[in-house]
Amino acid sequence: MAEGGSRVLLVDDDESTIKMVGKHLEVAGFEVLVAMDGEDALAKAREAHPDVIVLDLLMPKLSGLKVCAALKQDQASQHIPIIILTGKEDVVDERACRACGADDYLTKSAGASTLVEHITSLLRKT
């Protein structure tokens, strides 16, 4: 279960992913905020100060890599753990995500339960 109703910003341009993953996070006790593109993700991260960000790589307006890099370069948001959740199973992508500051990298095939475990683990570290 989530610790103290932690806020998760879930960023994905796929509505079915938002619904499925968002529901799973809510059931686990998280407060879920949603952004559907990279620009919206930056705005919501800066205004809502979530405890964790779950970020897709391939999105309109700004890619997940650009969003991650921008948030990690901003002193106000660099402390927020970012989990990349993507359908791409590629070592090169994972390395690029880690290089831009992502704290974790999961493929969507890992499942929502694994995502909850990783979020909980990151929250315990911060």
Image: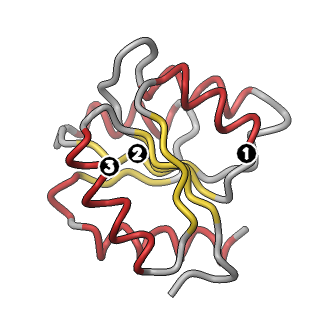
Is 1 situated left or right of 52 in this image? Answer: left
Point out residue 21 in the picture as x, y percentages from the top left corner.
31, 60
Point out residue 37 in the picture as x, y percentages from the top left corner.
43, 25
Numbered badge on residue 48: 1
Residue at image position (31%, 54%) is 106
**Quadrant of residue 3 within the rendered picture:** bottom right
- Tell me which numbered mark, 2 or 3, is placed earlier along the sequence: 3
Is 29 situated left or right of 20 in this image? Answer: right
| Residue density around tag 3, few if under 14, some if 14–19, many if 20 or more, within 10 Å | some
Residues tagged 1 and 3 counted as in contact (Cβ below 8 A): no
Q: Which residue is mark 2?
A: 84
Secondary structure beneath dot 2 equals strand
Amino acid on which disc 3 is placed = Ile
| Residue density around tag 1, few if under 14, some if 14–19, many if 20 or more, within 10 Å | few
**Quadrant of residue 26 within the rendered picture:** bottom left
Amino acid on which disc 2 is placed = Ile
Disc 1 from disc 2: Cα separation: 19 Å
Is 39 situated left or right of 73 in this image? Answer: left
Quick check: 99 above or below 20? Answer: above
Disc 2 from disc 3: Cα separation: 14 Å
Residue at image position (62%, 27%) is 42
Colouring rule applied to residues: secondary structure
Numbered badge on residue 18: 3
Disc 1 from disc 3: Cα separation: 18 Å
